[in-house]
Image: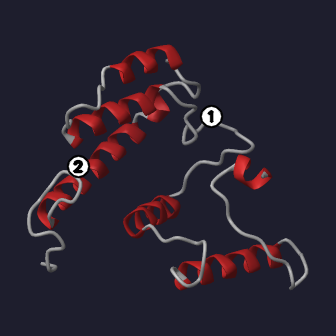
Amino acid sequence: MPKPIYPESTPLFPNWDDRRRGEDRLTVMLRDALSHVTEGRVAPTQGADSIGYGLSQFDFRSAIPIEQLLDWTIEQLRNGIVQLTHPRYFGLFNPAPTFPSECADRIVAAFNPQLATSTTSPVAVAIERRLVQAIAQRAGLPDRSEGHFTSGGSEANF
């Protein structure tokens, strides 16, 4: 058993046992939700109005158990987005997420590396630099090519 990070379990910083239970529950919930994607439509079955109503039920004055939030959020995502993992989805700009990318997202969420400077995150900056070089090489671009990853099209365009 790893040494506890936090002596007492809190909703934002649970101890290892509570964290493991939460992560295991989330993994099962995601597996179940994604296994049902192929049974439904590719396009959203509910719109912004119904989501807005659901969101209005959260007043942010008192804590809500994480289990309740996860249940609600996953249900909304099952019905309120284009299902990129559906076998009949053929999108151009939104590829289906892969298992390695899901793992990477969990790792990055846990460590929250900041790529603004190699002083604070030398490993993350080095990984980004190497990946950009490898992509440029595969694309046939010159060795001196540079770039960086962005969180989306708006940031990239800016």
Depicted 93 relative to depicted 137: above or below? above
Whether residue 79 is situated above or below residue 107 in the rendered picture: above
Q: Is residue 96 above or below residue 134?
A: above
The residue that label 1 is drawn on is: 88
Question: Residue furthest toward the front?
Answer: 61
Q: Which mark is residue 100?
A: none
Task: Return the x and y of residue 23 as percentages of the image width and height.
Answer: 26, 56
Neighbor class of circle 1 (other Cα within 10 Å; few <14, some 14-19, many 20+) is few
Q: Amino acid at mark 1?
A: Arg
Q: Residue at x 55, y 78 (%)?
A: 124
Which residue lies at the image location 20% right of the left edge and 33% below the top edge? Answer: 62
Residue 55 falls left or right of residue 6: right
Tell us which disc is closer to us: 2 or 1.
2
The N terminus sits in image quarter: bottom left
Per the rendering, the mark at residue 25 is 2
Q: CA distance from mark 2 to mark 1?
A: 28 Å
Mark 2 neighbour density, 10 Å: few (under 14) some (14–19) many (20 or more): some
Q: Position of residue 100 (x, y in %)?
A: 50, 64
> Does residue 122 appear left or right of residue 2 in this picture?
right
Q: Is residue 47 visible?
A: no
Foreground residue among 101 and 152: 152
Q: Residue at x 20, y 37 (%)?
A: 63
